[in-house]
Image (cartoon, rainbow, N blue to C red):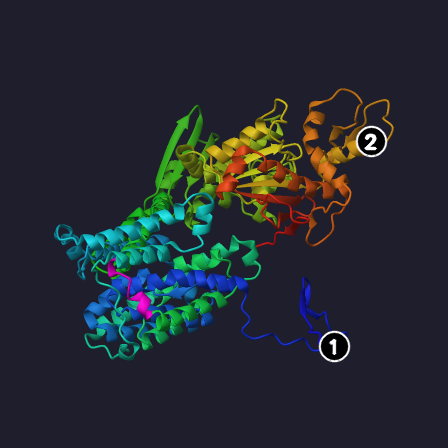
Amino acid sequence: MTACVSTPTPHGPARDSGSPESHAPPPRRKPFRIAGADFSASLAVFLIALPLSLGIALATGAPLQSGLVAAAIGGLVAARLGGSPLQVSGPAAGLTVVTADLIHQYGWRATCAITVGAGLCQLGLGLLRVARTALAVSPAIVHGMLAGIGITIAVAQLHVVLGGTPQSVVLDNVRGLPAQLAAAQWEAVTMSGLALAVLYLWPRLPRRLGRIARKVPAALVAVTLATVVASLSGLRLPRVDLPSWSNHALPGLPEGPVLGILAGVLTTTLVTSVQSLLGAVAVDKLVAGRPEQAARVPRSNLDRELLGQGAANITSGALGGLPVAGVAVRSTANINAGAVSRDSSMLHGVWVVVAALLLVPVLEFIPLAVLAALVMAVGIQMVSLNHIRTVTRHREILVYGVTTLGVVLFGVLEGVALGVAAAVATALHRLAHTRISHHEQDGTHLVRVRGQLTFLAVPRLSRALHLVPSGAPVFVELDGSFMDHAAYETLQDWETAHLAQGGTVEMTGPAGTRIAEPEADPHSHCRPWIPWRNHSYPAVAPGRPAVARPGEHQLASGIGVFQRDTAPHVRGELARLAREGQNPSQLFLTCADSRLVTSMITASGPGDLFTVRNVGNLVPLPGEESGDDSVAAAIEYAVDVLRVASITVCGHSGCGAMQALLSDADQAAQPVPATGARAAGPGGAELAVAPGAGPVTPLRRWLRHGGPSLELLSGPGQELPGLVDRSPADRVEQLCLINVVQQLRHLRAHPSVARRLAEGSLELHGMYFHVGEAQAYLLTEDGSDTETRGPRLFERVRAT
């Protein structure tokens, strides 16, 4: 029997490729079909979720099996009903403090009922479609909340690591640390130290051993190793105790003050919702950076995600589980493992159920101190130095600090409320405090505005502007991101009057550029490239006097435009790079062709790329540079000093160097003319290519490094690289593609590159840019293998 196979086409629905009747009904989709990538990803996530779920349950003071219930429900319910296909939900460290406080005040069964209530609130918010509103919370508040929770977790679990029992209040735990240190149980400390050492060292194992080892989660290795050592050593340590499922506690009606219970429901709803929604947004960003997944995974539906989280919390609370939220660590592991659908998260929930039913005797060997060390490490990681640097750079460190201290000293809900109040106060302070100054130097007046320009600052702005005498040249520098209508009208009215009196006005700064020059141009979304697009960019907006000097050449004019429009935007970032030095992510080796603008086609900025450009994007083999070591020196510096993570070789269509190579080969097969021939390259550029005619020019000497690419093109029976969606347009395009692959081979011959490839710390990538179509292509293989297995294909990069 011949089976009909449904084949999807690039431009339409699936076609029946096996049946001769075009009108035959399409074959039915097989149920329960799981992709291999989802299956392997589910195992990776399960191995991380199992020890963390037990550790979080231990940290909250809940029954340990409640962590397993929450992990299973997060996989089976939240993943199935939620709107973020690759987000993995379960018991989250961010909920530890909230849950522990609820258990302390109302007991475990009441906490389960509060979890159900929080789930119902999430369902209501999802039906009201207000999920996007949660994203309006300042990131400084969210990061501060997580940092405060992390500090609380770390301080509490440190007592368990030392062999003691934590208190319910952070300050009590801090005050009790000296006594706990004096009475430390060294067996617990030793096993916790072993687990922490493995957690730290496992991701840092070098070379091939590290690549293999990192396939197994560090948390699983740490818990397993410490458990085995503790069992073989015969240490008497408190261990995991999973009660019988027949005695599992289910929710009960909470008893206590109504306002307190409602506050618990509100806090749980707030933390679970914000963490899950921000996690879904982060998942979208991670997926967007991986083209192979972005093409198959839809973006998150935040309202549906809130509904899915609400259903999961109702189910988890009803079955005696911890509150559920999206977990960043597990979601990242899911994406990195190559998951392509929600099946991976659902299957990980199945594995948790299997483990909870069949692996109870094994789990009960785990020492509690080892789980505490694992959770303490998670708490420490929640205080992110990167987040602190980010909020400091955006001048929101006060909001971050207030939120963190509020969570530590008073609780999550109180800390978030204090953070919101600090954020509002900071915003009002910025709006109300604007610094305006006036200076004169050599007859030129400078009016500088620092801060947001609102109606409150209009009187001071008017006084500063009227200090400028009639007919004088003046620069107005606006350093702020906001200007209201009152300030705008004041500035425009003064400018009109000053120009009428013969003066000149030059606006600089972020706000000045946008308001003084309204973006009516249909290409305004591509404003940074306007000077390049028409080659005659006006220095100022229509109706304003030009500031360019007579006879000023195009380069100087372009630099002037940069100083006026772009420099105010990038000055802060460039100042940071000047202080910290360059730390590029990759070496980008491409052609010197003037049509190839690397920052434009890679959407990169200052400090992102270490760029090398030469004629033909060639990489000479070691020892064949003939006195020119510039490319080899750049490769060595980028790989050994800057420690870039990847190298990209980028070719392009219509390459003059490749045309010269082909012309050289064609003329070599013909009688040599009396005078040297010259081939016209793109844009009319001439390249001396005639073999054996005239002197050997520096260009001819350089192009000989492209000889191996030309030999591949002319070789008999050679399987050549190509494009996935079409055939190469001509021999020049075919040679451009071959040249990219050949230069990747040359790269691997350089000792520094070969060493980093062997360590697994460097990747090679090939890229082809079609200038006329403005379309980029990437090699479907990463170019780092040492053997060529069939023809290489370049795949079109889709818009994201």
Which residue is at the far top?
A: 695
Name the spot of residue 326 as percent of width and height, x first: 39, 63
> Residue 684 falls in which quadrant of the image?
top right
Q: Is residue 267 above or below residue 255?
A: above
> Residue 634 falls in which quadrant of the image?
top right
Name the spot of residue 613 as percent of width and height, x first: 60, 33
For the residue marked with disc 2, what is the amino acid?
Gln
Are circles 2 and 1 on residues that touch, CB within 8 Å? no
Q: Is residue 473 visible?
A: yes
Q: Is residue 155 above or below residue 457?
A: below
**In this picture, residue 694 sits left or right of residue 288:** right
Residue pointed to by mark 1: 23
Give yes or no for residue 480 being in the magenta stretch.
no
Residue pointed to by mark 2: 667
Q: Is residue 128 visible?
A: no
Tag 2's secondary structure? helix
- Quarter of the image with the N terminus is bottom right
For the residue marked with disc 1, what is the amino acid?
His
Q: Which residues are magenta?
A: 360-369
Tag 1's secondary structure? loop
The residue shown at (87%, 28%) is 671
